[in-house]
Image (cartoon, helix red, strand yellow):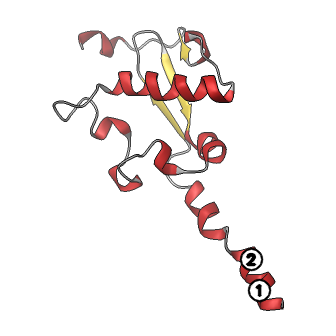
Amino acid sequence: MFRLLLLLLLLPAPLMAQENTGREVFDYASRWGMVTFNHREHQQRVGDCLICHHEGVEMGVCSNCHGVIPGLPQHKDVLHKKCINCHWKKSGPTDCAGCHDPERLDESVYGD
């Protein structure tokens, strides 16, 4: 009985270890203001890495493919669609200023 209880307590351990992988926070430059993405918070809320990393975590961040590989949607378009749909469902911010900080502009994105 003790072994069964111990096994049940240890089952979530690999899932919890996976939740805390990757950088804690990402900053994305945008012509509407910097977007600070709290990766750690989203990992805890979503729980399944494949929701965002649809090709597997080993593929890395969205911008490794989106905006690089011809035929794939641009990085910003993917983020807008994926993020806003989830935010609507989970009551996250859905207005521009909820994610974009107009006080932190990055003029390097104006050339795209």
Instruction: Using the image, determine if residue 98 lies above or below residue 13.
Output: above
Instruction: Identify the residue shown where x is 59% and y is 68%.
Output: 14
Q: Farthest left residue?
A: 70
> In terms of secondary structure, where does tag 2 sit?
helix
Question: Residue 34: which numbered mark, if any?
Answer: none
Q: Mark 1 and mark 2: span between their CA atoms?
A: 6 Å
Instruction: Identify the residue shown where x is 53% and y is 22%.
Output: 84
- Horizontal placement of 44 versus 62: left or right? right
Which residue in the protein does label 2 denote? 8
Q: Residue 83 at x, y = what percent?
A: 51, 27
Q: Observer-nearest residue: 89 or 107? A: 89
Question: For residue 79, which quarter of the picture?
Answer: top left
- State the count of labels: 2
Instruction: Using the image, determine if residue 32 lies above or below residue 54.
Output: above
Q: What residue type is labelled 1?
A: Leu
Q: Residue 87 at x, y = what percent?
A: 60, 25
Q: Residue 91 at x, y = what percent?
A: 69, 24
Location of the N terminus (image quadrant): bottom right
Instruction: Identify the residue shown where x is 59% and y is 11%.
Output: 95
Location of the C terminus (image quadrant): top left
Q: CB of mark 1 within 8 Å of CB of mark 2? A: yes
Neighbour tally class for label 1: few under 14, some 14-19, many 20 plus, Cα within 10 Å: few
Q: What residue type is labelled 2?
A: Leu
Q: Residue 96 at x, y = what percent?
A: 55, 11
Question: For residue 5, which quarter of the picture?
Answer: bottom right
- Horizontal placement of 28 versus 75: left or right? right
Which residue in the protein does label 1 denote? 4
Instruction: Using the image, determine if residue 36 lies above or below residue 18.
Output: above
